[in-house]
Amino acid sequence: MQISLSKRFSYSVALTAFIAVAATAYASGPRVRTVLMRDDCDPATFNAAVGPGTCVGDGDTTFSDFLDEVFSEGSADEWSFKPRKTKVEHGVNARNRGGEFHTFTPVEHFGGGFVEVLNLGAVPLNECALRTPGGVLARDPQGNLIPAQPALDSLVPPDGKSETTSLRKGVHKFQCCIHPWMHTTIEVK
Ligand SMILES: [Cu+2]
């Protein structure tokens, strides 16, 4: 089979263009990145302290060790989003590899979640905790903060995966509204 010179030329132009696009995509990260949500909750002590079903799986940090670490360090190391910072081309989703629920909530900036004891004084974000129309934090009859809709919409159960969120160019932040130190910064070039 003979390929005309002009066809060969257009083929090579197309190939060059394809390689350039592929190289750009590679340089700006994968199309979609999956952020892993991790924790190390010990089911027996977490479920006894917080309530049945709080923790499933086989983590081995007890609830009191977890709280000790949070109060002394400001965070618990094994509760994290991985990676904490990344570049993508198009979008992001999250997979929960831990034993607790986490949220993958888009936020304007990082801040407090809806579990007050874990905020260590940080002000709860509007994306995480419900406020009255007057701007006051809403509370249930026991005095607990009430999760805001964006937090509820972005809950990921243990072993679960979130839908992929398409992102525009720029810098995007996602955090857990339960454990506020769990967060990631995603850049779309
Ligand atoms: Cu969390």
Image (cartoon, grey):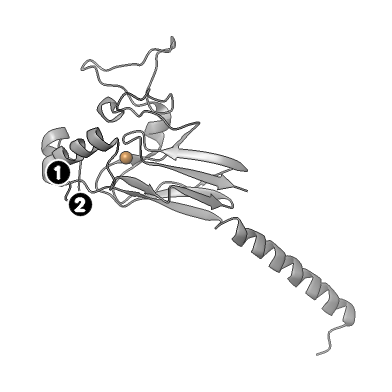
Pick the front one: 27 or 47: 27
Q: In which quadrant of this rendering is ligand 1 seen?
A: top left
Rendering coords of residue 111 (x, y %): 40, 29
Question: Element at badge 2?
Answer: loop
In the rendered view, tell whether residue 15 sits above or below residue 185. Answer: below
Beta carbon at label 1 within 8 Å of ligand 1 = no
For this orientation, the residue located farthest to the top is 134
Amino acid type, mark 1: Thr
Q: Residue 177 carries which label?
A: none
**Callout 1: few (<14), some (14-19), or many (20+) C-alpha neighbours within 10 Å?**
some
Residue 150: image location, x then y, percent? 43, 31
Q: Between tags 2 and 1, which lies in front?
A: 1
What is the spatial separation of the Cα atoms under label 2 and label 1, in whole angstroms? 13 Å
Q: Which residue is drawn at 66% across and 60% down?
A: 24
Q: Horizontal placement of 47 versus 111: left or right?
A: left
On the image, numbered disc 1 is attached to which residue? Answer: 62
Residue 46 seen from this side: no
Q: Is residue 182 above or below residue 145?
A: below
Q: Residue at x 20, y 36 (%)?
A: 67
Q: Mark 2 points at which residue?
A: 57
